Image: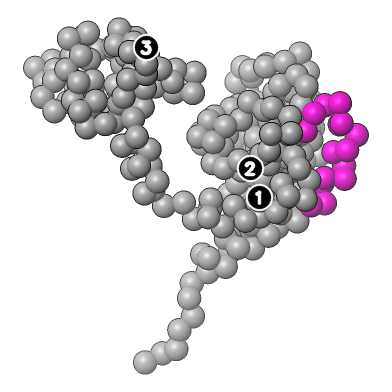
């Protein structure tokens, strides 16, 4: 793509990535002007790159003319290896079938949790997590379950920063949060009550393989039924253990006979 190639300091590839990076969970549809502003590009450059990306179907137009991610990117995304997703999906489906509640799977990415899968039904309580979405670690069940098993230096660094407070119930005091994380390590699971979203509570367990948390599985239900959370802990832990065992088997070196 040749658009904007004369602008110094940035390669064409970096500009294309900036255009694609302008989109996100909170910016699913953008005008051309918004794309240019969020990508940090002149409007003329954004116009040329967007036209080529549209032709390649990496971007498409909504009925009102706003730009959005196209099917070609979704198609490419399906080619990415997803062993964790494939191993965990049957367990998540089984947990959903036995509880009828929202179930999701998340991994740590930097200081956030990235949701890689979700199983839910129309009768389950609405939740803010979405596959491919990111949320802070400390107010979410899966995030807290992962944070509790991180090395001390990481936890201390995380607690030293200014912590987001999505609701009035979110624990942001470093000392109190540190005690919560100690409790998670001691009991093997995390519980949160309206810390990420008013009206919902959660239980989550880390998926630990060879002593390291590789992901976390969580279950969310209405805060009106918070008293039911304890009964969900046992099937939740069984799910985390089952996924961890599957990962361990899949990553174990194959034993073969010598020549």
Magenta stretch: residue 224 in it? yes
- 107 or 197: which is nearer to us? 197
Q: Quadrant of the N terminus?
A: top left
Q: Quadrant of the C terminus?
A: bottom left
Is 36 left, or right, of 106 in this rendering? left
Is any part of residue 28 visible from this angle? yes
Q: Position of residue 165 (x, y in %)?
A: 68, 16
Looking at marks 3 and 2 on the same chain, the residue that comes earlier in the sequence is marked by 3
Alpha-carbon span between mark 3 and mark 2: 31 Å
- 213 or 95: which is nearer to us? 95
Q: Residue at x 70, y 23 (%)?
A: 196
* Disc 1 and disc 3 in contact, CB within 8 angstroms: no
Q: Secondary structure at mark 3?
A: loop
Q: How many marks?
A: 3
Look at discs 3 and 2 and give the one toward the viewer: 3
Q: Residue at x 74, y 33 (%)?
A: 123
* Disc 3 and disc 2 in contact, CB within 8 angstroms: no
Q: Residue at x 64, y 63 (%)?
A: 245
Q: Secondary structure at mark 2?
A: strand
Which residue carries the number 1 mark? 92
Which residue carries the number 3 mark? 64
Dot 3, how many residues are within 10 Å of its Cα: few (below 14), some (14-19), or many (20+)?
few
Is any part of residue 138 visible from this angle? no
Alpha-carbon span between mark 1 and mark 3: 37 Å
Magenta stretch, residue numbers: 221-235
- 50 or 146: which is nearer to us? 50
Dot label at residue 62: none
Which residue carries the number 2 mark? 119
Compared with residue 99, is residue 197 higher up or lower down, i.e. above or below? above
């Amino acid at each position: 793509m040749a658009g904007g190639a004369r602008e110094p300091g940035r390669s064409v590839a970096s500009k294309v990535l900036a255009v694609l990076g302008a989109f996100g969970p909170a910016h699913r549809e953008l005008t051309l002007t918004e794309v240019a502003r969020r990508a940090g590009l002149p409007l003329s450059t954004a116009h040329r790159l967007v036209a080529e990306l549209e032709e390649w179907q990496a971007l498409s137009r909504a009925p009102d003319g706003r730009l959005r991610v196209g099917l070609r990117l979704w198609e490419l995304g399906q080619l990415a290896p997803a062993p964790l997703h494939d191993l965990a999906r049957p367990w998540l489906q089984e947990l959903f079938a036995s509880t009828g509640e929202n179930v999701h799977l998340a991994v740590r990415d930097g200081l956030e949790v990235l949701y890689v899968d979700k199983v839910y039904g129309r009768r389950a309580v609405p939740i803010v997590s979405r596959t491919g979405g990111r949320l802070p670690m400390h107010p979410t069940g899966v995030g807290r379950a992962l944070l509790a098993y991180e090395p001390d230096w990481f936890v201390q660094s995380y607690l030293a920063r200014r912590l987001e407070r999505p609701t009035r119930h979110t624990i942001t005091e470093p000392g109190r949060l540190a005690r919560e994380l100690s409790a998670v390590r001691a009991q093997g699971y995390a519980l949160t009550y309206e810390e990420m979203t008013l009206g919902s509570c959660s239980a989550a367990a880390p998926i630990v393989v060879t002593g390291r948390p590789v992901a976390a599985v969580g279950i969310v239900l209405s805060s009106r039924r918070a008293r039911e959370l304890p009964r969900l802990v046992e099937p939740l832990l069984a799910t985390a253990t089952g996924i961890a065992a599957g990962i361990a088997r899949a990553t174990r070196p194959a034993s073969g006979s010598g020549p």
